[in-house]
Amino acid sequence: MSLKDLFPNGLQGGVKKKVYTDVSCQLPDDDPAFGDKRYDLSEKIIGRTTMHQFVNNLVDTSVRMQNDAVTKVISTCKAALPIGPNIVEDNSQNDTYVVTESNGGIVLIRNKNKIKPLFDGIIQILRKEVCHKRLEDTKTYYVVKITNKKGQDRLVRIPSEEYAEKGFRNINTQCPDVVFYSTTPNATQFMNEYLAKILSMIPTIEIQHVFMYSGWEQLDGTWQYLNGAMPNVKSARTLVARDNMNTDYIEKFFQLSKNILCTGQEKESLIIFLCSHLGYLSKLLEEGGLSAHFVMFLKGKSNTGKTSLISELGGEIFYPKKNIIRLEDTPAYIERVIAEMQDTNLLIDDAHPAPTKVLEKIINENVERITRAYGDMQLRGKCRTDMDTYDKKISGAAWLTGEYLNLSSFSSALRVLEVELADIGVNKEILSSLQQDHLIAKTYYSAYIYYLEANFEQLVKYFKNNGAEKRQKWRTTLNGAMDRTVDIGVTLEFVIETVAAYANTIGIDSSIWQAESENKLASFLLKQVEKNKKADPIELFKSAIKELYDAGSLKLAASKQIFKDDLENIGYVDDNRIVVIRTLIEEDIDNLLRKKGIAYLKPTLKELYQKGLVTALHPIRFSTSRTDNSRPTMIEIIFDIK
């Protein structure tokens, strides 16, 4: 007997089969037990089995055979999405799914008549946004407009790498007021495929570049100073708009700037004024082959108006909230603010002797970090977002205020241009005028930036062509000056020239001011050269030893035996030498120079030996034990006591 005899009507009439092409549609999308990646969990669980592979092959073959018979529904909306046959039955009847817009929302249509809502809003892709940041890689987003059924719009930015799989999740998270019908089976997958469809149907998409920072940037071959007043810049730094300029403010500030300090400090007043332009000019100088590589230190006693004045002249005037660093701040915060304050002037406030050794170490490290960053025009550290190391060129200027600046090396000292205020300090009348109307300074510096922008290429060419000649001029003027000081002279002379040309464009005759300013600058830098010589560690060591000895502050015994018996002495005299306990003499020198506001950059014994100031390359132990049984480490200093 055959099977035909047993089943004369065949198997087809007695058994009905359903094969599911997408097993994941049987898993509830809104079930939290499946985690963030619930949309592909079924594939992970079932996709590995042999039976599943067999069923897939069977279904794929069946679908290909019937694909031509599937009705593809395209609605009048631009986002109709035919999903295709989802269930294959034995009678060759297929279910067709279409996702489309309807009555202000997104709906799922099954077999052309069964409608289920998916999302109570309309989705429209507006543009592609390329986002540029200072210390991070460029990122791309799709900007999508969501319109709810009340006609209210909301913009959502979806990272391009997340658009395919997490695009709708971004929308749903950022639009909690728009209902999403997550209970509909496979609703999230339908919405993600809908997003993919509407993107594919856009022939060309607008691309918009957005900059998340301010400062100089070359766009389409033209240098521009990006700031928050521009439509494609998202930054808190905002210049006064070109069409809102009051030239009376510009002229008023130019006149006020001549007397920002009290009478008798004309040279110092000029240096402060010139340095206030340096942050905006720095990029042009770099393009012209010259780096400013120095910071200005405004030194003075408390309540002389140092910080208040610098706050009215620095880059903080372009911000609603001032970006001021204090030397006690964390390195991460300092690096972030330096990155933000590119192409402007950054204020670092309140350099002072630390009350504790821990705080002193923090302050000293931060001083070194800042002076090296602006001295070398390089920012090194960890990027706060992904902790990748970065090594970025920086452009701009910085000035510190305080009573005392401790530097760890002589090379760091050469990166600092010190301006010391007299006790009478800042001209309070001028300061009051600037504080009462912030637009005076803000308008002046905005117009200066626009002048640089309009003449960027010409100024860079001028700096390139005249840099060598200027250097030779300042080497001659500052006879014996180091290269860094020479470069300060060249840099500030270029500032004078750009300010004079800028003033001429608004009708101010600046010829007399320019000549006087160059003379004052030369006189000030000649004093700076002398300060640099005195700041040499060797010179400081020699002068401090002599001053301590002449003042009777060194407790020296008349002989080696007396030193051995009397513990109050720190050393003894031996012919043309003084033999002293190394740690104690270094402490006495450091305390003396600290009181005078001079940072002591301790020289090594090798440096002292090479200059003929000590008798040996290494310290020596005292030959016998003192009365307290100690044998201190000594150094022999060659010193003429007569």
Image (cartoon, rainbow, N blue to C red):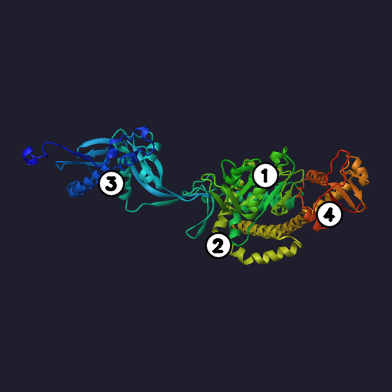
**Looking at the image, is mark 2 or mark 4 earlier in the sequence?**
2
Q: Looking at the rendered structure, which numbered label has been put on residue 309?
A: 1
Q: How many marks?
A: 4
Label 4 vs label 3: CA separation?
Answer: 88 Å
Coordinates of residue 161 in the picture (x, y in percent): 40, 47
Coordinates of residue 451 in the picture (x, y in percent): 57, 56
- Badge 4 crowding class, 10 Å Cα cut-off, few under 14, some 14 to 19, many 20 or more, is many
Residue indicated by mark 3: 78
**Looking at the image, is mark 1 or mark 2 earlier in the sequence?**
1
Q: Say which quarter of the image contains residue 628.
A: top right
Amino acid type at mark 1? Leu
Residue indicated by mark 4: 614
Residue indicated by mark 2: 457
* Residue 277, visible in the rendered structure: no
* Residue 93, visible in the rendered structure: yes
**Looking at the image, is mark 1 or mark 3 earlier in the sequence?**
3
Whether tag 1 and tag 2 are in contact, CB under 8 A, the answer is no
Amino acid type at mark 4? Val
Location of the N terminus (image quadrant): top left
Label 1 vs label 3: CA separation?
Answer: 60 Å
Please name whichever residue, 143 or 524, is drawn nearer the observer in this view of the structure. 143
For label 4, the SS is loop
- Mark 2 or mark 4, whichever is nearer to me: 4
Amino acid type at mark 3? Lys
**Looking at the image, is mark 2 or mark 3 earlier in the sequence?**
3
